[in-house]
Image (cartoon, rainbow, N blue to C red):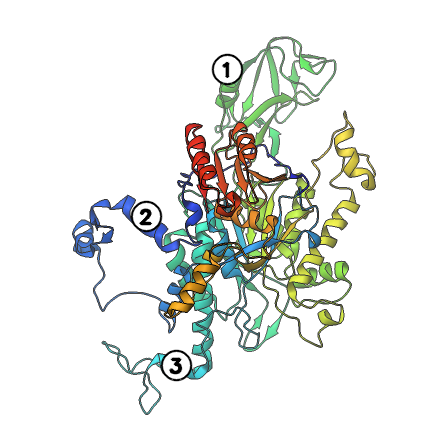
């Protein structure tokens, strides 16, 4: 294969999560989505004494925690529904799938840091666990609202038929009351089979996805979930269970501009916000004009008495050359007590003592001593300076930002208009406006290199919002969007416009939004025509410029594993002939149609690399590395010989991974390779 490199784009100030990396030596052999094992490991770290021969001793756990901390067996507050146990089993089950790159449908595949995954989102979230656990700063999702009229398209095995649901919920008495044990027997009445069925299926769909999403969040990460009144109450309780009630941040009310009337006119939706760990979540930073300035003098009073401050020469002055009179101002006077009040070359020319009713006299004096000054609101004072009229001003950073829980600035109509402007037809119903998502991102992701995830991507609003915000403020935020290729209705506007499924709508929308941003010239060097942006960005010096906005995205699609041992195992017992046939098949563990690129990306994920990490396809070797350039790894997926092994060893990688078939049955070569890499202190593994 010809050399091809995807350069690693090391980003300055990119904040990596503070977490311990797992031992990667044999991690390749594990199946993906070790949710249960990870929870057991966390429990073992907290309570090692409750484990006996790798089993949990619950009686000992009771002793450790004390009886006072345990719920009474039949008296507990919880959210329950038919199918909840199956939902947890689905969460714990492994995935036998992987992601395959689709370069043809991507934009700037080899350089972009953005990812679009065309897949069922439960499978995608499981596949992403090893590579992205603890790395996502913000998640925004707009899941199905479960109105009863929308199609339910996420095909989990626990989506029951109505008859199956009726059998699950138990017997009823002649009046339609469910027969339940306990103090409230006979008091439970279900409005209708359909309503109960919809709620249970919706909750069962959401539960595993939210658990997996939580794992992907950083400790200071947050999730926003759009929802209407159909499931708002259930969602709040579900999030309390998944994230912990103590990590609830707020419920935002978005006045979306749409109205529907019954007893009341409904004109809003809800956006529920939870933190992974609220104690780790700092107050939101102000995004916008970073500083505020104001005068430091007021009218003399008992609260602001007159005092004298001596100012040294050199303080900044917004005046070239000027000499001021003994008294400046009338109602808020500044009096020269000692020295000459004069500016030269935009600086205070000589020391001067001034008397005034200073509003922050102690802060001024501390700043003049060279100390850091923080005001009562926690805002840092950057500097004091004299205006051209001689009045002392302060400049301080705006500290924390406290967004209001009622959002009125954005409408669904705006979202529809943006999409129609891009795609020319109304191909998606009620899309969220990019400005709404960009607003949420702006104050959560104040580190402009943060990663944003949306696993109900729909028409691609989140991707559009991230690119647009980066264009506006020079950020380098990255996104991962996941969308099921749900078929569009046969006679819909989307189908008429040529879109066979929703994922196709999203990809085309992102392409056109990126092109629109590039045409706007926002993301190019100042005064440079947008059509020359790509070449000019690295060639022109001496011009102030924003960084070029990343408007590309890598497309990946869900596929079965390319390795036989990671496919779904056969069910039932095998006879002797079937066992022999299976043994023969596993002489080569790779499927015939598996290409080097597909295998490399699957192994990349299983080794814990991100989909946008550096990958270089050289002759006989695939080189991987992470953003920090600390995990150089060699994949040998084709025939190898001693010369290839020597060349790889000379590069001093952290790890070498070789397909067993690459040795072509040469056991001596394989044994020597293992010894040589061990002597070189290089991790060596075969499959």
Taking depth in this image into account, of 116 and 684 the one nearest to the observer is 684
Q: Secondary structure at mark 2?
A: helix
Q: Which residue is mark 1?
A: 369
Is residue 304 positioned above or below 597 on the image?
above
Residue 643: image quadrant is top right
Which is more toward the observer, 266 or 18?
A: 18
Disc 1 to disc 3, how far (Cα)? 72 Å
Assign a secondary structure to mark 1.
loop
Q: Residue 70: where, in percent of width, then height? A: 21, 58
* Label 2 packing within 10 angstroms: few (<14), some (14-19), many (20+): few
**Residue at the image position 63 percent from the left and 60 percent from the top:** 432
Which mark is in front, 2 or 3? 2
Q: Nearer the viewer, mark 1 or mark 2?
A: 2
- Upstream in sequence: badge 2 or badge 3: 2
In the drawing, does residue 494 fall left or right of residue 249?
right
Q: Judge left or right: residue 389 versus residue 630.
A: right
**Inter-mark Cα distance, 2 to 3:** 40 Å
Q: Which residue is mark 3?
A: 190
| Residue position marked by numbered label 2 in the rendering | 41
Question: What percent of the width, then of the height, locates residue 578?
Answer: 42, 68
Callout 1–callout 3 Cβ contact below 8 Å = no
Q: Nearer the viewer, mark 1 or mark 3?
A: 3
Badge 1, how many Cα within 10 Å: few under 14, some, many 20+?
A: few
Q: Which of these two is toward me, 221 or 374? A: 221
Q: Callout 3: helix, strand or loop?
A: loop
Can residue 271 be seen in this snapshot? no
Horizontal and vertical percent for residue 480? 58, 51
């Amino acid at each position: 294969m010809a050399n091809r490199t995807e350069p690693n784009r090391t980003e300055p100030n990119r904040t990596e999560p503070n977490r311990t990396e797992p031992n990667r030596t044999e991690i390749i052999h594990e199946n993906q989505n070790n949710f249960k094992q990870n929870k057991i490991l966390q429990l073992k770290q907290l309570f090692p004494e409750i484990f006996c021969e790798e089993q949990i001793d619950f009686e000992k756990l009771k002793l450790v925690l004390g009886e006072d901390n345990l719920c009474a067996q039949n008296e507990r507050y919880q959210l329950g529904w038919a199918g909840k146990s199956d939902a947890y089993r689905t969460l714990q089950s492994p995935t036998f799938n992987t992601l395959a790159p689709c370069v043809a449908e991507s934009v700037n595949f080899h350089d972009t840091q953005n990812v679009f995954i065309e897949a069922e989102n439960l499978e995608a979230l499981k596949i992403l666990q090893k590579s992205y656990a603890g790395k996502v700063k913000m998640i925004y999702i707009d899941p199905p609202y479960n109105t009863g009229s929308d199609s339910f398209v996420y095909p989990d095995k626990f989506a029951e038929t109505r008859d199956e649901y009726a059998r699950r919920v138990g017997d009823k008495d002649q009046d339609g009351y469910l027969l339940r044990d306990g103090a409230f027997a006979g008091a439970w009445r279900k409005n209708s089979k359909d309503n109960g069925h919809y709620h249970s299926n919706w909750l069962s769909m959401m539960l595993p996805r939210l658990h997996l999403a939580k794992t992907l969040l950083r400790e200071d990460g947050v999730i926003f979930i759009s929802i209407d009144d159909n499931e708002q109450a259930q969602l709040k309780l579900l999030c309390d269970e998944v994230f912990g009630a103590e990590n609830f941040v707020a419920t935002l009310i978005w006045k979306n501009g749409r109205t529907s009337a019954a007893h009341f006119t409904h004109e809003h939706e809800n956006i529920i916000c939870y933190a992974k760990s609220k104690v780790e979540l700092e107050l939101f930073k102000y995004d916008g004009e970073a500083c505020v300035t104001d005068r430091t003098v007021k009218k003399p009073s008992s609260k602001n008495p007159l005092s004298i401050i001596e100012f040294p020469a050199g303080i900044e002055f917004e005046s070239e050359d000027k000499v001021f009179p003994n008294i400046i101002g009338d109602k808020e006077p500044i009096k020269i007590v000692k020295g000459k009040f004069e500016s030269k070359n935009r600086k205070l020319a000589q020391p001067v003592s001034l008397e005034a009713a200073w509003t922050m006299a102690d802060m001024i004096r501390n700043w003049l001593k060279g100390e850091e000054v923080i005001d009562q609101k926690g805002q840092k004072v950057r500097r004091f300076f004299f205006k051209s009229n001689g009045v002392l001003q302060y400049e301080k950073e705006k500290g924390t930002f406290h967004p209001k829980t009622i959002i009125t600035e954005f409408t669904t109509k705006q979202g529809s208009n943006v999409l129609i402007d891009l795609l020319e037809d109304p191909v998606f119903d009620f899309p969220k406006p990019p400005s709404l998502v960009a607003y949420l991102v702006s104050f959560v992701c104040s580190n402009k290199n943060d990663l944003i995830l949306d696993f109900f991507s729909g028409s691609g609003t989140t991707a559009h919002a991230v690119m647009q915000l980066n264009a506006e403020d020079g950020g380098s935020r990255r996104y991962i969007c996941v969308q099921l290729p749900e078929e569009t209705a046969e006679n819909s506007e989307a189908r008429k416009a040529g879109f066979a499924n929703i994922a196709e709508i999203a990809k085309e929308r992102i392409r056109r939004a990126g092109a629109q941003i590039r045409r706007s010239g926002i993301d190019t060097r100042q005064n440079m025509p947008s059509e020359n942006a790509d070449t000019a960005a690295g060639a022109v010096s001496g011009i102030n410029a924003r960084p070029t906005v990343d408007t590309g995205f890598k497309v990946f699609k869900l596929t079965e594993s390319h390795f036989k041992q990671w496919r779904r195992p056969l069910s039932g017992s095998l006879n002797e002939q079937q066992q022999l046939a299976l043994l023969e098949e596993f002489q080569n563990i790779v499927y015939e149609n598996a290409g080097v690129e597909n295998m490399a990306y699957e192994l990349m994920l299983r080794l814990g690399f991100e989909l946008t990490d550096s990958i270089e396809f050289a002759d006989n070797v695939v080189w991987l590395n992470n953003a920090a350039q600390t995990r150089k790894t060699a994949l040998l997926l084709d025939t190898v010989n001693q010369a290839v092994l020597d060349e790889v060893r000379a590069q001093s990688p952290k790890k070498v991974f070789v397909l067993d078939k690459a040795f072509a049955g040469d056991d001596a070569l394989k044994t020597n390779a293992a010894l040589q890499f061990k002597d070189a202190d290089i991790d060596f593994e075969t499959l």
